[in-house]
Amino acid sequence: MLVEAEDVSVSIGGRAVLDGETVRCAPGTMTALVGPSGSGKTTLLHCLGLLLPVDRGRIVVGGDDVTGYGAGARRRFWRDHAAFVLQDYGIMDEESVAFNVTMRSGLFGRRVTGDLERLAAVLEQTGLGGRQEEAASHLSGGEKQRLALARAIYKQAGVVFVDEPTASLDAVNRRKVIDLFAGFAADGRTVIVSTHDAEMIEACGSRYEIGSARAVAA
């Protein structure tokens, strides 16, 4: 699913954060949004994911102008097409690892439902194998980041929005996470990453420099 920003500008608290940014994020490719700290990488990522409205310009997803989507249409987009791996992880500490991945449980009790075979596979992929029943509060920061990634893989979303995915990871897990995202893109999905990690940027098929008005093929 092609995701585009066209001449997007955003001001927050009276300060211009984005000014006329245009980027094209193609399916089957990881696109890195790059720039120095405070340049607006995360803001642009949130605009592309319909988490933040734009002041000027358009957001286009799959050829459709989604800039003016209301709350219901945004929720349907998030439910049906998008997954997010954000710096705050979006993890529910009081719930189990399994529930945080599938987001589904039985009507009565706490029994997790969904595709349990796929659940086990994605936990293995992300280094959390066998920890389905643990409370998410027991996980370290890096493990919670991988749990958010497991949720995105489990959902099989068409578009994945990722904010600094390697920030809390050691070298081994950094490489593992990068490879997982690369594999996700190779399956035909659109992966959009806000990052300053040189290794992550190197793995991306294209990168967009905030403020440069240009995309750069990797």
Image: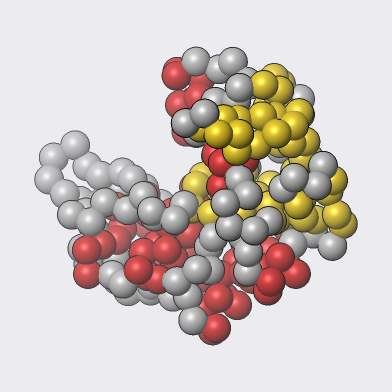
At x 22%, y 63%, the residue is 137
Residue at the location (56% across, 47% down)?
42
Q: Residue drawn at (49%, 81%), measured in percent from left and top?
A: 170
Q: Nearer the viewer, residue 103 or 59?
A: 59
Task: Please state which of residues 47 and 80 is positioned toward the viewer in this rendering.
Answer: 47
Q: Residue furthest left?
A: 109
State whether residue 200 is above or below residue 20: below
For residue 80, above or below residue 147: above
Quick check: can you spot residue 120?
no
Closest to the observer: 176 or 153? 176
Q: x, y (%) of residue 41?
A: 61, 49
Q: Position of residue 139 (x, y in %)?
A: 28, 70
29 versus 2 height, above or below: below
- Where does the C terminus fall, quadrant-wise? bottom right
**Which image quarter is the N terminus in?**
top right
Q: Quadrant of residue 35?
A: bottom right
Q: Position of residue 140 (x, y in %)?
A: 31, 72
Q: Is residue 55 visible?
A: yes
Q: In the image, is 100 to the left or to the right of 19?
A: left
Residue located at (18% from left, 54% from top) = 94
Q: Is residue 42 left or right of residue 59?
A: left
Q: Residue 167: horizontal and vertical position, in percent? A: 50, 68
Q: Nearer the viewer, residue 197 or 102?
A: 197
The image's colouring method is secondary structure
Q: How many marks?
A: 0
